Every structure is written in structure tokens, then in C-alpha cells.
């Protein structure tokens, strides 16, 4: 496993649409393991492959007690609304309010190519939508309706 460099806003790789994963092989497993290690080190909640410079449809979310690995994910259902503060490891020190669905259903594959569906709510739903947007080349900043400043005393 290796910690990968996290790409920052302004890098064109973050504005591109990612390609579907076609081979569920050792290389994919390595990418996911590296992303998990990178996310832990960065103390983040979610990480998408383009954030480590790889234009593949893969993201991970740390739920605290477990990690979700989502390959070729789709948000197949979304309902309700929630407004809350988001940040992104690719946009250091930028925080802002974003409105997202309150509930969503994530359909994706794991590294072995097994499909699953997960119902997510609140922070988990917010995170899945944020990470999904990365695969479409979209950063959360375009959805921010109000920026937040955290000042040290
Ligand atoms: Ni992000």
C-alpha cells in the first residue's frame, strides 16, 4: 500500500469525467487500498479516484466503523433535502453550505465485481453525492450558496 498525492483544485484532472472500471483486477484493488490509506492519513471522510489523479469511476467513504468502496457507482434514488457545510480534501481551507438529498440509494460494485445497493441518509448521503460529483468532474464549490470562515482566536 502507498499513500498517494491528493490533487488540488486548479488541476485539470478534477474537471474531467471519469471512465468506468472494466477490469476488477489486482490493479484496481491496489488503487482502492492506496485510496483508503491516503484518506486515513488525510483524516477525510471520502475520496474519489480523480483526487489521486486516476480518471476511473471509483470512490470510497469512511463511515467510522467501516469503509464503503464504490466502483462504477450510481445514485439510483434520491429524496428529501439537507443543507449543511462541506469541505473537500482537494480544496483546502474552503468550507461552504451545500444542499443535497437527505436520502439516497447507492448502487455500485466492490473490488471483486460484486454489485450491491446501500441506502444512505444524512452525512452518508451527502458524502456519496459529493464523491459521485467528483467522478463527473464537478467540485462542491460550484454548489456552495454561502461560504463559511473559521477563524482562530
Ligand atoms: Ni471532495
Image: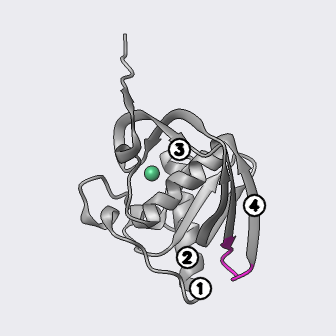
Q: Residue at x 68, y 57 (%)?
A: 67
Can you identify the residue that label 2 sits on?
A: 30
Q: Residue at x 51, y 52 (%)?
A: 130
Sequence-wise, the earlier of marks 4 and 2 is: 2
Sequence-wise, the earlier of marks 1 and 3 is: 1
Nearest the viewer among 72 and 48 is: 72
Q: Element type at marker 3?
A: loop
Q: Position of residue 79 (x, y in %)?
A: 67, 49
- Tell me the mark number nearer the camera, choosing from 4 and 2: 4
Q: Are marks 1 and 4 in contact (CB under 8 Å)?
A: no
Q: Are marks 1 and 2 in contact (CB under 8 Å)?
A: yes
Q: Are marks 4 and 3 in contact (CB under 8 Å)?
A: no
Q: Residue at x 53, y 82 (%)?
A: 21
Can you identify the residue that label 4 sits on?
A: 118
Compared with 124, 32 (above or below) is: below
Q: CA distance from mark 4 to mark 3?
A: 23 Å
- Tell me the mark number nearer the camera, choosing from 1 and 4: 4
Nearest the viewer among 72 and 6 is: 72
Q: CA distance from mark 1 to mark 3?
A: 26 Å
Residue count near mark 1 (Cα–Cα under 10 Å), binned few <14, some 14–19, many ≥20? few
Q: Element type at marker 2?
A: helix
Compared with 125, 93 (above or below) is: above
Can you identify the residue that label 3 sits on?
A: 43
Nearest the viewer among 129 and 32 is: 129
On screen, residue 121 versus residue 143, left or right, reads right
Q: Are marks 1 and 3 in contact (CB under 8 Å)?
A: no
Q: Please give the range of residues in magenta.
A: 108-114
Residue count near mark 2 (Cα–Cα under 10 Å), binned few <14, some 14–19, many ≥20? some
Amino acid at each position: 500500500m502507498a499513500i498517494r498525492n491528493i490533487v488540488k483544485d486548479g488541476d485539470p484532472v478534477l474537471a474531467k469525467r471519469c471512465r468506468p472500471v472494466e477490469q476488477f483486477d489486482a490493479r484496481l484493488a491496489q488503487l482502492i487500498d492506496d485510496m483508503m490509506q491516503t484518506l486515513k492519513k488525510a483524516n477525510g471522510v471520502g475520496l474519489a479516484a480523480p483526487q489521486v489523479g486516476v480518471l476511473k469511476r471509483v470512490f470510497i467513504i469512511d463511515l467510522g466503523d467501516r469503509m464503503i468502496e464504490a466502483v462504477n457507482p450510481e445514485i439510483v434514488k434520491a429524496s428529501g433535502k439537507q443543507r449543511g457545510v462541506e469541505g473537500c480534501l482537494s480544496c483546502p481551507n474552503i468550507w461552504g453550505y451545500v444542499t443535497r438529498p437527505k436520502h439516497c440509494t447507492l448502487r455500485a460494485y466492490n473490488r471483486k465485481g460484486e454489485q450491491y445497493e446501500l441506502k444512505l441518509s444524512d452525512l452518508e448521503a451527502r458524502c456519496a453525492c459529493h464523491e459521485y460529483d467528483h467522478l463527473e468532474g464537478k467540485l462542491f464549490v460550484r454548489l456552495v450558496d454561502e461560504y463559511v470562515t473559521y477563524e482562530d482566536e
